[in-house]
Image: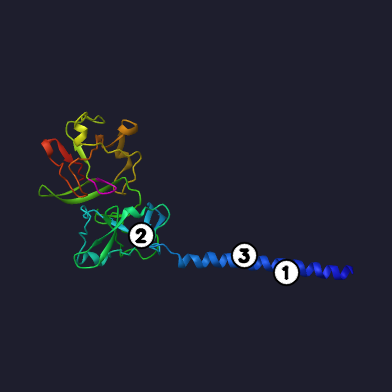
Amino acid sequence: MKTHRNVLTGKLWAFVAAFFTVLLVSCDDDDYNNSPTQELDVQVRSTSLGDVLTDANGRTLYFFTRDADGNSACTGGCLDSWPVFTVDNPSLANGLDAGNFGTITRNEGGTQLTYKGWPLYYFSGDSEAGQVNGENVGGRWFVAKPDYDVMLAEQIVAGQETRYLVDGAGNSLYRFANDTDNQSNCTGGCLDNWPIFGASNPVLPSVLNLTDFGTIGSGAALQSTFESRPLYYFANDNDRGDVNGHEVGSVWFLEDIQ
């Protein structure tokens, strides 16, 4: 009887071990299989430049500073190096807001996905997932970070090619000639036309230096500075790419970057 009991006990333990082995393998298979079948169209990947937007395969996506108004200024041969990224009804990584994505129709036909108004591109010089070789190419191409506070835009302004500061959604930023270092002299009703721009410890493209940015004030009155100059929006800029505040009264100017 003792031997028979031991045999039964051994069989029972063998059954339990086999059951849990199958269960664990099944779970591992599910996790593995879910990876390719549930790939997200737009993901966020950690790179040497911080978190960037990528496609489902981890290929880095980029912004172009000349797309100031939200339309693509990369056409013709430009597209050989910077192919457009597009996908209908994209599935998004956790933390990405569908409201920040849109679609534009390109002049040559087809569509292109946008993020916060910026058309999205690949760089032909990236051959593997996670590469960021397109960063600062020509001073005009930058990785598409999900959380820029400050970016750069470029367009013809007052007859001149101008590169200037914008917020993460492409809205123009201005300086006031009557301000002094780290001191805003736009107060009262002035702020109705020139709302302040504020971002503490801003996320920037690599060409900009965090040490050039600071803040004055606090709370709702927190205002960012660039090279000690307070930064503002202009109330009469209705759309990204608008630069209606430039040269107003000969004292308001885009915060241009040389």
**Within 10 Å of the Cα at label 2, are there few (<14), some (14-19), or many (20+) other Cα atoms?**
many
Q: CA distance from mark 1 to mark 3?
A: 14 Å
Q: Decide which of 182, 69 is in the foreground and name it.
A: 69
Percent x, y of residue 78 = 22, 64
Q: Is residue 76 left or right of residue 208?
A: left
Q: Which residue corresponds to mark 2?
A: 60
Range shown magenta: 166-171
Q: Decide which of 139, 146 is in the foreground and name it.
A: 146
**Within 10 Å of the Cα at label 3, are there few (<14), some (14-19), or many (20+) other Cα atoms?**
few
**Within 10 Å of the Cα at label 1, are there few (<14), some (14-19), or many (20+) other Cα atoms?**
few
Q: Which residue corresponds to mark 1?
A: 15
Disc 1 marks a residue whose amino acid type is: Phe
Q: Which residue corresponds to mark 3?
A: 24
Percent x, y of residue 139 = 25, 53
Q: Quadrant of the N terminus?
A: bottom right
Front: mark 1 or 2: 1
Specify whether residue 247 is painted magenta. no
Going from the N terminus, do you reach mark 2 or mark 3 first? Answer: 3
Q: Mark 1 and mark 3 in contact? Answer it, CB < 8 Å.
A: no
Please name the residue shown 20% across and 51% down the image: 154
